[in-house]
Structures are given as structure tokens and as C-alpha cells.
Amino acid sequence: MATKFSRQRQAIWDFIKDRTDHPTAEAVYLGVKSACPNISLGTVYRNLMLMRDTGMIRTVEVGDGVIHFDPNTTDHNHFICTNCGKVIDIDGGDVEAIKQEAAAHFTGRIQGYSAYFYGLCPDCTKSAATKTTE
Amino acid sequence: MATKFSRQRQAIWDFIKDRTDHPTAEAVYLGVKSACPNISLGTVYRNLMLMRDTGMIRTVEVGDGVIHFDPNTTDHNHFICTNCGKVIDIDGGDVEAIKQEAAAHFTGRIQGYSAYFYGLCPDCTKSAATKTTE
DNA sequence: ATAATAACAGTAATCGTTACTGATTAAGAG
DNA sequence: CTCTTAATCAGTAACGATTACTGTTATTAT
């Protein structure tokens, strides 16, 4: 067989598989250290990219110059807080409708899709409201 | 006055203002060299980022790890060819409808938006069809 | 248990972007 | 037109995320 399931790969998968906070490679690296104290950052990158290439996870590029990883491979949109940088899933939107809408105005075949919405996340909206009137 | 309109900035603006091909900083740098033979890459970056900050142009992050620049600041979508990497505008889509659709499923205020569609561009579709059946 | 090789840790290299330097130069005042 | 001054420049060094390389380790099939 071609693939060996190493302890490190398992640890990375265990760490990321239920995440909804779109960690970076660095964050995965730090998070996996408890299970694999001397894992290498290169190993984390290699495995994350391999998981992406095999469709286990998806990469998300938010505009902060760093790659984020998302175990949710179903079609969905992302919200990025312009204040704290948090990346939040927007579930339940009719992604198919959005694709259709764009396809109607383009003469190529649209396969994939990813959209990013920007604004203040609920938390930052709250703390902004707390501050003295501004 | 705070702003000086240098020859270099003018050249960069002249180069990019009518482009629809979303050049990178590197591409702008090369393209501007004929007008400004010894312009510096740093100058190109500084001016492009300044133009973005003042709303003259927009940055587009496509997933290739490089920043692209777009003089079209009106709301529109982008198509990225997974074969040749070309970035093409999708004009005429109802962007507002897409925003609404997503906003309906999210409890924060959505301000900005950018969406990317992936697939084979018209050119690559054509040349793929030319090849022996595969 | 052993062989074969995927995967590893550690580190060096790459590359896009940003920051720093002292030298230029655009723009307003006299 | 000349002078002043601060914005901008060219050139280069620094930075940080990601990738590539190298010799070692460990998973899997036999």
C-alpha cells in the first residue's frame, strides 16, 4: 500500500477534524504538540496539504497572508471579522443558487466556489457597543 | 498638501488603471519599467498598497499565494482558471442578492464581500477539447 | 523478524512582502 | 526662479510563511 498512517498524521487529524475555528498550520502545530511533543512544523504542513489534496480538509485563504484549514468540506461560506480576524462558518446558505447566479454571467464552466464576507463578528460588535459613545 | 504625485506613482497608475487581467506587483513592476527604467519593486508595492488604502484599486487574493491588483472597485465576482491561473471578472451578477442570501444565515453585520469561482476558462476549455480524447 | 519504503525531525532554502537607509524631488512660499 | 521641507524614491536588508532537502525512524506486508 502507498499510504502509512503515522502517529503524527493521526494526531493532526484528531486535532483538526472537529474544529470550526479554521486554525493555521502554526496553530495545528502548537495544538498537536501535547500529543506529539517533538513533531516538526514541516510534518504538519506536509500532512495538512496531503489531507487537502485527498479531500479530507479544505484550505481557506482569508486575506491575512496565512493559510487556514477547515475540516468542513461541504459547500459553505465564510465570515471574517475585520477586527479580530476570526473566521466563522456561515452554514445554511443556498450555495447552489449563488453558483447559478454567477454562472449565468460567465461563459466558462464553474466548478468550485468560495466566498468571503467581511464585517464585525458578534463578539466584536458587542464589545464595540460597550465602549463610550463613538 | 500631504500627497505628492510622483512620476513613479503616475506611471503605476497609468499602467494599471485600465487593466482587466489583475496583475501582481511583480507584473506591474515589469510593466512600468519601460516608463521608469530604474523603479524599485518596493516603490511598486508601496504605491499599490497606498492606492488600495485610498480606494483607487482593490486587492484580490486568488489562492496562489500572491496578491493581485484590480482597478475595478465596483462590486463584482472573480473567476480563476484552475489550469492557467488566469483571473477573469464576472460582471453583471447580482452581488447584492448574494450578500443578502448570506446575511440571512449569519448573526453579524456583513460589510464587505468577495467571491471566487473556480473552473476552466474559455481558452483552456478550448485547448483541452483539441487534445486527443482524454 | 525482516525488508522496503513512507514518513519523520531538523534544518536550510525560497520567495513574496515589508522595513529601513540616506539621497531625490515635487509643490508651495517668497 | 530659488528655497525649503517633507513626501517619495532606489537600493538593500530583514521578515515570515511555506517548501525542499537529508539522513533517520517506524509502519506495513510478507
Image: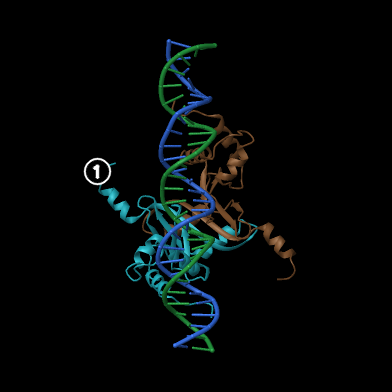
Chain colours: A cyan, B brown, C blue, D green
- Where residue B127 appears, as percent x and y from the top left, is 71, 61
Q: Amino acid at mark 1?
A: Thr
Residue B121 visible, this angle: yes
Residue at 68%, 61% in the rendered image: B125
Can residue B105 be seen from the camera position used here? no
**Image side of residue B39 versus residue B131, left or right:** left
- x and y percentages locating residue A55 in the rendered image: 51, 70
Instruction: Give the residue at mark 1.
Output: A132
Image position of B56 with respect to A23: above or below:
above
Q: Residue at x 42, y 57 (%)?
A: A79
When asked about the image quadrant of residue A18, the answer is bottom left
At x 40%, y 51%, the residue is A119
Residue B113: x and y in percent read 47, 52
Question: Around disc 1, counting alpha carbons within 10 Å, would you say few (fewer than 14), some (14 to 19), or many (20 or more)?
Answer: few
Q: Is residue A62 left or right of residue B24?
A: left
Residue D12 lies, in percent from the top left, at 50, 39
Which corner quadrant holds the C terminus of chain B? Answer: bottom right
